[in-house]
Image (cartoon, coloured by chain):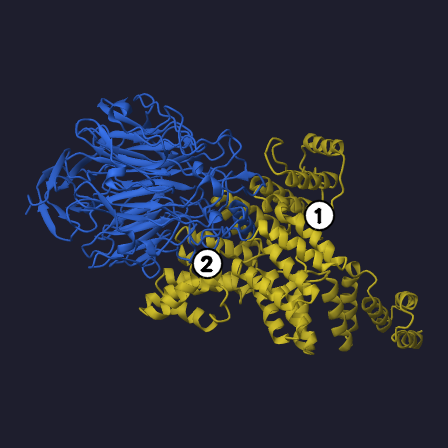
């Protein structure tokens, strides 16, 4: 996967390539779902009223996604995707129903009820949201995004102590998230604990220089301490601060389903993949004249410029994106990639670390951090982000491949083998993974599998220099 | 009308050409929450939480039609073309134009923007004379106040100190000043008085004696320098055409301060006093001595831009001081979509606090005055957050609607963007909200919604407040976009004791003078203020609920120049006149 492209190619898939299914099939599926009425029947896809006026492109997108769900109504992921399509386009009631459906099929995935709660919040049903969020943190006290949203709800009720508790729990799993740090500092200001807020923010304010809420809250804290000059400096920098949250993976993915931009992005990404980044630039520039504040378009434009080799322009575009949405994790990923191209590895590492702090529960930031560290030859330091990425995305091909290599070098063959096996489904016929499997199976004494993978290496990469040593190893064990 | 609560989340519509709703949703979809860091909802539904109990007693009875109010507002929307002013009209005024002791009602009409700013014949602003016994008569033609401009709001005040209340109408295009001739008729003196303007969009306005020379000056809030030629296509989150946000136009207005020259004419002194130094998408105004230095100050609620706080110095100049004084943006630094505004002493500590209504997904925001005009966003601590983020608020008024000595608040709501599961035929309808408080000074929503049974559902905009039937209960008039107005008769006021004061100087209502009374309930303060709310004008006479107390020993007036004068004792259940120089 190329991390510069806003659309992910990971296990969550790319922009929906959903097969069109005849309406009769959908109707039949809906009918059957309605008739069965028993608890065990998979849920029917959530729909909006037929007469609801939406743009044709959105209607088509919804219809396609509903068709896909109707064809596989027991697929939680599809219900979830339908929820994302609705949520991304402001159709919160249908989105909440879709997430409920997904949760009924995949009860151990907290993202579905989290987004059900978010949709309730968007529609003003705060009590319902509170109930769900409270349950989520009760079930899993390490689910940071749920703690964050719960904290926000408590702030809205004037319960600053309760909010502080929630934000601190979020901090346990997202220690460096600016959103969480500022939320805690804000609670201090609300409780007139101005010095505590300053102690929290002042040491890191320069690291958060693009993050206006941090400045505004610090300005309020200095004001509370009677330090007018310092206060005004930060208040000015913080005015008109955008909102913020601790993102989860679904929040990040669903941005791609906004129909206003998704079709443009899809075309642009296609052009980039076809080796025509200049055309992608033209397309995206044109779209941005209509949607100047659309950060997803800016991120892809930066990616396109990066592919043309125009790194300064790419960084300029990313700076625009950061102004609009300072906590956008994708912007930081893209910045890291551009800086890697410019051989500014410390800068690239800082950007990757920012991505990790903005979205600590999303694998891609950790992957990018590991990528930079490996380029810096700091292999041991890369282990932790690789492991974190794999914990968050167990079948991530690149992270597992690197982890396999790391364990191989330490001759931990069982761990290496597990990593390569996890990589395999999404890595396809990637040379390093196949070689790694051959070698690790050989060391583990599973000689039939070792030989099988070695044969694949011979067939596809006959000049691979590992063939001889692995063959020798197998023979020595026979 | 920016999209999305306090620490607010939603947002942010980016500046410039993009469809604001779309962008709001974009961000909301991304971040979501609300309240704080995102708190709140986006183009949400009009319903708040389904668990809300709707079983409480009514506070108001709607009776517009029964009273003879046949006005129907028309925004002019043709079902196809979304013209910006259609979404933020219109206001309403209550004032006693004929000095018969009964408040009359002036409803602002909008009608049609096509072909200039002209209405259809008959679709003009309307004046309804209060006949008593809860009956009204349309006297527009006799009174000569049927302005046919595309109306946004109105302001009232006796600018010529002749003892009767004059009327200013804000429009898309030229505003109108009607001089009350004292015989039941008005004269349009816009041109001769020097207030005639070029095409702009005026919203709220306020009469007040800023230079302390004895006559009322006029502050007019300008929204966007909109005209049909700058209109844009904007889209909501579902990709369908909808109204734009102000930032799309990049044409914020400059407000105007007219100095009353005392000879029937006004002079635009905006540049001279510094008001022209800052632009903004202004909607609401809250005036008063906000830093207690004996001079009139102005606060302007801007839509999506930081607000403006114009503090007057001893040279008669104004300095924009909102950022340092904590009212430019909310507690998280977010510039919210200011609509209506009010200056009111919510915590009874002697200084004026500020309350603003905002867009859905934002909270309405309370800036508590910590002294000297230094404000803190205390929205959540006083209960205003959770009660507002599901609505787009416009007109508002604080008062003691049930005379229990504690402040209540009525908020008029109505959407500006087509929401999820939009109702038909009007997708912008929302319930209004009635809030009540108790000894804790924390506000909570009253059930049933808006205090009426059944709850009313229209797209409300301006709201004006006053005791229209002189029964000791504050009544409310609400102008609803593309619908009939509400005339809400207070049915709770008679349950307890009350007292009212008309505060006069120069023979007219003493705008922005403050009155303090004390009793077993503690200290209560009110300010003579017609211009709070949104594009509307309310009764100047002050109303206090007294609970079970039957008298007030002393009423202390703090005149706008900071001097004080005491009056009393007074009996409850009456309206008393406090005239400057006749106290002690």
Question: Label 2: how many residues lie within 10 Å, few (<14), some (14-19) or many (20+)?
Answer: many
Rendering coords of residue B367 (x, y %): 33, 53
Picture quadrant where residue A343 is located: bottom right
Q: Is residue B136 left or right of residue B519?
A: right
Rendering coords of residue B203 (x, y %): 35, 42
With respect to residue B248, does B108 lie above or below? Answer: above
Disc 1 is attached to a residue of which chain?
A
User: Which chain is rendered blue in the image?
Assistant: B
With respect to residue A138, does B125 lie above or below? Answer: above
Rendering coords of residue A304 (x, y %): 68, 60
Q: Earlier in the sequence, mark 2 or mark 1?
A: 1
Mark drawn on residue A321: none
With respect to residue A71, does A389 lie above or below? Answer: below
Q: What is the quadrant of the C terminus of chain A in the image?
A: bottom right
Circle 2 is placed at which residue position? A241
Q: Nearer the viewer, mark 2 or mark 1?
A: 2
Disc 2 is attached to a residue of which chain?
A
Q: Is residue B568 left or right of residue A175?
A: left
Residue B516 or B282: which is nearer the viewer?
A: B282
Rounded to the nearest whole Å, what is the CA distance between mark 2 and mark 1?
A: 33 Å
Circle 1 is placed at which residue position? A16
> Element at badge 2?
loop
Q: Is residue A318 left or right of residue B345?
A: right
Residue A91 or B326: which is nearer the viewer?
A: B326
Rendering coords of residue A123 (x, y %): 50, 42
Chain A's colour is yellow
């Amino acid at each position: 996967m190329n991390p510069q492209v806003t659309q992910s190619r990971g296990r969550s898939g790319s922009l929906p390539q959903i097969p069109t299914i005849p309406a009769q099939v959908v109707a039949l599926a809906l009918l059957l779902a309605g008739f069965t009425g028993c608890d065990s029947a998979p849920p029917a896809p959530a729909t909006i009223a037929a007469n609801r006026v939406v743009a044709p492109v959105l209607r088509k997108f919804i219809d396609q996604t509903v068709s896909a769900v109707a064809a596989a109504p027991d697929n939680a992921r599809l219900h979830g995707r339908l929820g994302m399509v609705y949520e991304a386009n402001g159709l919160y009631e249908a989105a909440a129903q879709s997430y409920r459906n997904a949760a009924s099929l995949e009860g151990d995935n907290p993202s579905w009820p989290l987004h059900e709660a978010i949709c309730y919040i968007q529609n003003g049903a705060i009590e319902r949201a509170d109930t769900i969020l409270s349950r989520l943190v009760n079930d899993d006290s390490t689910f940071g995004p749920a703690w964050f949203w719960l904290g926000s709800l408590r702030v809205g009720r004037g319960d600053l102590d309760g909010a502080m508790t929630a934000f601190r729990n979020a901090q346990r799993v997202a220690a460096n998230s600016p959103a969480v740090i500022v939320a805690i500092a804000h609670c201090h200001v609300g409780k007139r604990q101005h010095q505590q807020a300053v102690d929290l923010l002042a040491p890191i304010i320069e690291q958060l220089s693009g993050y206006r809420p941090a400045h505004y809250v610090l300005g309020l804290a200095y004001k509370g301490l009677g330090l007018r000059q310092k206060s005004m400096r930060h208040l000015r920098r913080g005015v008109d601060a955008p909102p913020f949250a601790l993102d989860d993976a679904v929040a990040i993915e669903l941005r791609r389903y906004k129909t206003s931009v998704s079709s443009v992005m899809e075309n642009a990404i296609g052009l980039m993949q076809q080796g025509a980044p200049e055309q992608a630039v033209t397309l995206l520039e044109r779209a941005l004249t209509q949607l100047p504040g659309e950060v997803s378009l800016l991120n892809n434009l930066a990616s396109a410029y990066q592919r043309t080799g125009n790194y300064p322009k790419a960084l300029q575009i990313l700076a625009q994106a950061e102004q609009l949405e300072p906590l956008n994790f994708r912007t930081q990923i893209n910045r890291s990639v551009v800086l890697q191209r410019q051989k500014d590895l410390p800068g690239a590492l800082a950007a990757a670390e920012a991505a990790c702090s903005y979205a600590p529960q999303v694998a891609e930031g950790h992957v990018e951090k590991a990528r930079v560290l490996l380029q810096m030859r700091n292999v041991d330091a890369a282990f932790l982000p690789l492991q974190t990425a794999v914990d968050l995305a167990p079948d991530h091909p690149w992270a597992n491949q690197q982890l396999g290599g790391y364990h191989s070098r330490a001759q931990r063959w069982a761990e290496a083998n597990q990593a390569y096996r996890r990589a395999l489904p999404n890595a396809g016929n990637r040379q390093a993974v196949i070689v790694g499997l051959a070698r690790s199976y050989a060391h583990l004494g599973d000689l039939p599998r070792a030989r099988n993978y070695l044969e694949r290496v011979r067939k596809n990469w006959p000049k691979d220099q590992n063939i001889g040593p692995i063959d020798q190893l197998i023979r020595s064990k026979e | 009308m920016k999209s999305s609560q306090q620490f607010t989340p939603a947002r942010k519509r980016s500046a410039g050409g993009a469809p604001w709703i779309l962008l709001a949703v974009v961000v909301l979809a991304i971040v979501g929450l609300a309240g704080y860091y995102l708190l709140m909802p986006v183009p949400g539904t009009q319903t708040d939480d389904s668990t809300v109990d709707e079983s409480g007693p009514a506070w108001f009875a709607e009776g517009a039609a029964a009273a003879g109010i046949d006005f129907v507002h028309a925004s002019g929307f043709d079902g196809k073309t979304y013209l910006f002013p259609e979404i933020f009209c219109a206001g309403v005024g209550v004032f006693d134009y004929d000095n018969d002791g009964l408040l009359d009602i002036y409803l602002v009409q909008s009608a049609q923007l096509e072909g200039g700013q002209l209405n259809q014949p008959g679709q003009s602003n309307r004046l309804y004379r209060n006949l008593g016994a809860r009956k009204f008569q349309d006297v527009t033609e006799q009174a000569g106040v049927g302005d046919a401009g595309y109306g946004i709001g109105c302001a009232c005040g006796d600018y010529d100190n002749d003892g009767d209340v004059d009327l200013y109408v804000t429009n898309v295009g030229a505003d109108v000043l009607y001089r009350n001739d004292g015989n039941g008729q008005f004269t349009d003196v816009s041109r001769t008085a020097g207030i005639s303007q070029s095409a702009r969009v005026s919203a709220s306005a306020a009469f007040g004696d800023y230079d302390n020379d004895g006559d009322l000056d006029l502050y007019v809030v300008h929204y966007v320098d909109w005209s049909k030629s700058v209109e844009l296509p904007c889209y909501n989150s579902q990709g369908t055409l909808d109204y734009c946000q102000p930032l799309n136009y990049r044409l914020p207005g400059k407000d105007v301060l007219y100095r009353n020259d005392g000879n029937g004419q006004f002079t635009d002194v905006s540049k001279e006093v510094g008001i022209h130094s800052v632009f903004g998408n202004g909607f609401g105004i809250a005036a008063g001595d906000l830093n207690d230095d004996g001079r009139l100050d102005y606060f302007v609620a801007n839509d999506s831009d930081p607000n403006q706080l114009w503090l007057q110095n001893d040279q008669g100049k104004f300095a924009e001081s909102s950022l340092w004084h904590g009212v430019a943006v909310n507690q998280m630094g977010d510039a919210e979509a200011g609509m209506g505004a009010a200056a009111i002493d919510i915590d009874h500590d002697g200084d004026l606090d500020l309350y603003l209504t905002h867009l859905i997904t934002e909270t309405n925001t309370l800036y508590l005055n910590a002294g000297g005009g230094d404000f803190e966003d205390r929205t959540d601590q006083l209960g205003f957050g959770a009660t507002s983020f599901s609505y787009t608020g416009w007109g508002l008024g604080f008062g003691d609607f049930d005379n229990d000595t504690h402040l209540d608040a009525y908020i008029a709501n109505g959407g500006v963007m087509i929401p999820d599961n939009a109702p038909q035929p009007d997708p912008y309808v929302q319930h209004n909200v009635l809030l009540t408080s108790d000894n804790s000074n924390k506000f909570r929503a009253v059930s049933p919604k808006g205090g009426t049974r059944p709850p009313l559902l229209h797209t409300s905009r301006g709201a004006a407040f006053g005791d229209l039937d002189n029964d000791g209960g504050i009544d409310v008039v609400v102008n609803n976009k593309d619908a009939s107005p509400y005339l809400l008769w207070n049915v709770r006021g008679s349950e307890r004791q009350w007292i009212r004061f008309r505060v006069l100087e120069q023979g007219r209502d003493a705008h922005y003078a403050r009155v303090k009374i004390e009793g077993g309930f503690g200290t209560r303060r009110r300010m003579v203020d017609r211009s709070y709310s949104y594009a509307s004008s309310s009764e100047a006479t002050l109303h206090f609920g007294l609970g079970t107390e039957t008298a007030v020993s002393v009423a202390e007036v703090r005149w706008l120049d900071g001097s004080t004068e005491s009056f009393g004792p007074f009996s409850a259940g009456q309206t008393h006149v406090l005239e400057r120089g006749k106290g002690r």
